[in-house]
Image (cartoon, grey):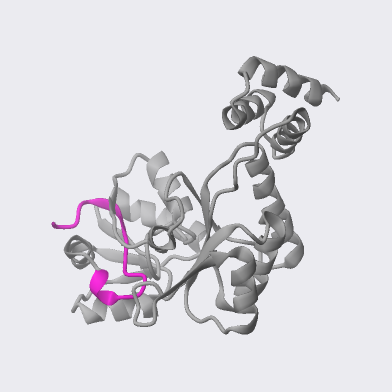
Amino acid sequence: MAALPGLTLVATPIGNLGDLSPRALATLRGADAVLCEDTRVTGALLARHGVSVTMMPLHEHNEDDQTPKVLARLRAGQRLALVSDAGTPLVSDPGYRLVRAAIAAGLPLHAVPGPNAAVTALTLSGLPPHPFLFHGFLPPRAGPRAAEIARLRAAERAGLSASTVFYEAPHRLAEALAALAEGFGGDRPAAVARELTKRFEEVRRGTLGELAAWYAGAEARGEIAIVVGPAPEERGSAEELEARLRDALAAGLSVRDAAATVAGATGLPRKQVYARALELARE
């Protein structure tokens, strides 16, 4: 289980420190350096396991500057590990630009899988586990947030049928749930998962309307994931077909992709849907 030359993405606990795997620990222990969001957070994790290793900060604000230095160390054959403060790197965390640069440079890339809040919340939600869409954080301001939810709803009208996972800050949870209830409908099934794997883990299930009402008057603490169930099936009249196609085209899909998506969702003949999509695109 020794660390391999190259860059290794290492998943770390999302709450319970006992969830660090033996392979993850061996990789961190054998690394020449550990790239991390916050050296204080990662330092505490390493200290708990008796690991002494050089730490290098890599976060949203310095990733572009750090990437050439990291690539130079990788070219020299070093073993580098990348971690986030919690969970799987790159999933709503820094590292994507570095990974893309390493791939483009032909440098070795590995991963040690492990904890992930989105997947954990999905499995605990009681909502359909696949397909699912991981969205991450909604925009913090009301206007952009409503626009993003409307874009997702348009994709649903065009045929998307999936459970969707969001991350949210505790102080924005109530307003985010209210916005989701407004955009998706208050009767849409959903779940709020917080403090996953920790002592006060909680998963509250209900409709978006019920959850919005609950958290309007209840304080939420800790890391939070929201899981929203898939849209109910919408069977189509000609008006509904046109609405789905318009939504798909407005969402940026090509005529061909819009027709394929809507045909798959409605069960209508693809040629018929494609012909109508062409007509709408020419308007």
**Extreme right residue here?**
283
Residue at 58%, 40% in the rendered image: 160
- Up-down: is 235 above or below 6? above
- Up-down: is 159 above or below 257? below
Q: Is residue 157 left or right of residue 79?
A: right
Question: Quarter of the image holding residue 214?
Answer: bottom right
Q: Say if the magenta span includes residue 127.
A: no
Residue 14 seen in the current view: yes
The residue lying toward the viewer, choosing from 245 and 142, is 245
Return the x and y of residue 96 as percentages of the image width and height: 46, 52
- Up-down: is 129 above or below 56? above
Q: Say which quadrant the C terminus sits in.
A: top right
Q: How many badges with numbers are in the image?
A: 0
Q: Is residue 65 left or right of residue 283?
A: left
Return the x and y of residue 249 as percentages of the image width and height: 72, 33
Residue at 69%, 17% in the rendered image: 272
Q: Say which quadrant the N terminus sits in.
A: bottom left
Residue at 18%, 60% in the rendered image: 23
The residue lying toward the viewer, choosing from 107 and 273, is 273
Please state the extent of the stretch shown in magenta in the rendering. 1-19
**Extreme left residue here?**
1
Return the x and y of residue 24 as percentages of the image width and height: 23, 62
The residue lying toward the viewer, choosing from 62 and 86, is 86
Residue 172 seen in the current view: no
Return the x and y of residue 281 as percentages of the image width and height: 79, 25
Q: Say if the magenta span includes residue 17.
A: yes
Question: Quarter of the image holding residue 185?
Answer: bottom right
Q: Is residue 124 left or right of residue 248?
A: left
